[in-house]
Image (cartoon, rainbow, N blue to C red):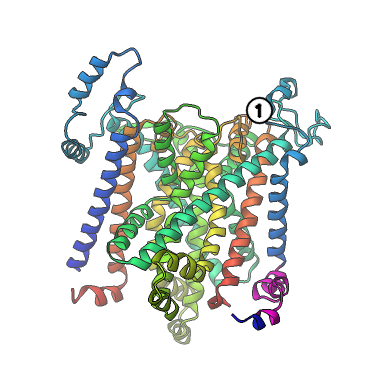
Amino acid sequence: MFAFVMRRIIEAAIVLIVVALLAFLLFRFVGDPINQMVGQDVSIAEREALRRELGLDDPMLVQLGRFLWNALHFDFGISYRFRQPVTELVAGRFPATFELALMASVFALAVGIPLGVYTGIHRNSMLSRFFLGASLIGVSLPTFLIGILLIYLFAVKLQWLPSYGRGATVDVGFWKTGFLTLAGWKALILPSITLGLFQLTLIARLVRSEMLEVLRTDFIKFARARGLTDRSIYFGHALKNTLVPVITIIGLQIGSIIAFAVVTETVFQWPGMGLLFISAVQNADIPIMAAYLMLVALIFVTINLVVDILYVVVDPRIRVAGGAKA
Amino acid sequence: MTPFAADREPGLVVRALDSDIWHSFTRSPAVMIAAGLTLLLVIAAMFAPWVAPHDPTDLAKLDLLDARTPPLWLEGGDPRFVLGTDNQGRDMLSAILYGLQISIGVSVLAVLLAMTIGVTAGLLAGYFGGWVETAIMRIADVQLTFPAILTALLINGSARALLGNKAVDGAEFWVLVVSIGLSFWVQYARTVRGSTLVEKNKDYVQAARLIGISPLAIMFRHVLPNVLSPVLVIATINLALAIITEATLSFLGVGLPPTMPSLGTLIRIGNNYLFAGEWWIVAFPGLALASLVLAVNLLGDWLRDALNPKLQ
């Protein structure tokens, strides 16, 4: 177990170092940092002075070392466009994205798992067929179209929910939360559905096919022979055995939730990290892009690591085969 | 192959009509509808300059007085503009046809690029092994950590910084092709590497090596044809994904500009007029996009099942 975890941690560290190298190359060689920082009327001598001051004429390895050292301390320099430290900008936007991603995942799980269980048990019912058809269409609708559709229905036509922003937020320390006001909750609904819908279909389809598989096995037949209730068979025995692949997929999908938060945040003008990243891409604001790249890599790698370890915890078979001897 | 055998072999058309794939195709109405729809959209896009009632690229012909005309069947509709017009007085139907052309063009080129890079990398990794394999597959692993759309956004942003935001004519088109292409190659590389590892040890490859054929020729002339069928399946499914990615990037404002609108750009423009109740500017391009992706997805699913004997 320990050796397994250590190996995974070393692999994760290698990925992070490679991504940091990429971020450094991006930062240092894509576009001249000095040109981005100063106006056209700044003389060459002044540029050279600034270059020396920022250490951009040091040997490459020294610069790389400094970049990595700073990154370890969450210092990613100054944004070209906002003229503020990147860390401050990203930290200010983080709560918005976190709350959105959290609610989207809760929505996807709370609806997806029951839907998957239901369609797995009643595979030929009307609702199951309707869901299978709808999910194919859902996969073909890009996230931003779903968002626009929801805005048109619930914000423009029915005028029940706001179409942009976070509503009213409350400061809890440095954290701006929308969870404490009614307007904040209302503003969360449409973006969370938009972001979670794809994950919902994925989870429901996965749970459904796993349920179909498990319900065919002998131990379920045996459970029926023992006269257990349907409820206990479906939820106590069958669902429990579908959870390993579901956990993997959910872990991997957190990455895609963060990626598509960029799209959802643009549709709903949600002031999170994704919106910041998009404006950085539009304006070629490299320090923000580099910081975002490393932050996202850190989140992904951590999640993959946690999923791998959870795997061992949830499924004793892996523990016996891989861990005991190692 | 002897000339006699060639004489007796039935023609290509006969063989195609008798193949498993054709049979599974004619058995599924949904797939035939999907294929028909794809064909219709592709042809309409290819012949957009002849099919479209107006030329949306000719800015001189636009009249702002025509702007935001509703579709024909609504009050205030104009028989010249069946699906209405956008904020600049562009005919929506024509704009959608031209937009389809651009969207399909970007996606097909991007998939071809991803396929070329991925297949080459997979062949090299599988055939040579050693450090070549380690290097290629490590890069693939790191890239796989990120969702394709983020990779595409990062490449897109870097390209912008390199070009210095100078408006090079048509540059946006190629930046999109490259950023989508570079974010999709990993899947091909992994698949091709796997099959190459198997093919490498077969007799025909050993024989070719013995008679002194160069490694490159063995890889591309002999191994490649034998590893190609899963590549085709991935390419079809990827095409749907590439269309969505292109539309998403354009919608986010880092794709094609309003002067050269793809479907995503049209939706981005229309999104601004949704609150005024002018839904058609966003609805029709959205419908075109969704039906194109749905049709290609259906074709991809069918091709995967038809080419995979294990599932039958």
Q: Could one spot residue B32 in this view of the protein?
A: yes
Quadrant containing the N terminus of chain B is bottom right
Secondary structure predominantly adopted by residues drawn in magenta? helix
Question: Between residues A66 and B73, which one lies in front from this camera angle?
Answer: A66
Residue A226, quarter of the rendered image: bottom left
Q: Position of residue B137 (x, y in %)?
A: 34, 60
Left or right of residue B96, residue B233 in this image: left
Viewer-closest of B161 and B213: B213
Element type where label 1 sits in the image: loop
To which quarter of the image does residue A173 belong?
A: top left
* Residue at position x 37%, y 67% in the image: B126
Give percent across and percent down for residue B294.
63, 55
For mark 1, name the chain: B
**Quadrant assignment for the C terminus of chain B:** bottom right
Q: Which residue is drawn at 54% across and 38% down?
A: B173
Residue with the most extreme right position: B79
Q: Which of A59 and A170 is in front in this view?
A: A59
Residue at image position (67%, 30%) is B57
Q: Please provide percent x and percent y for residue A319.
A: 26, 73
- Residue A159 is one of the magenta-drawn residues: no
Residue A98 lies left or right of residue B16; in this view the side is left
Question: Can I make out residue B187 in this image?
Answer: no
Q: In this view, does A20 lie above or below A53?
A: below
**Magenta residues, start to end:** B6-28
Taking B312 as reference, is A67 left or right?
left
Q: What residue type is labelled 1?
A: Ala
Q: Is residue B18 magenta?
A: yes
**Above or below — where is B34 with respect to A227?**
above
Q: Classify 10 Å Cα crowding around label 1: few (below 14), some (14-19), many (20 and above).
A: few
Q: Where residue B221 appears, x then y in whole percent?
A: 49, 67
Q: Mark 1 points at which residue?
A: B276
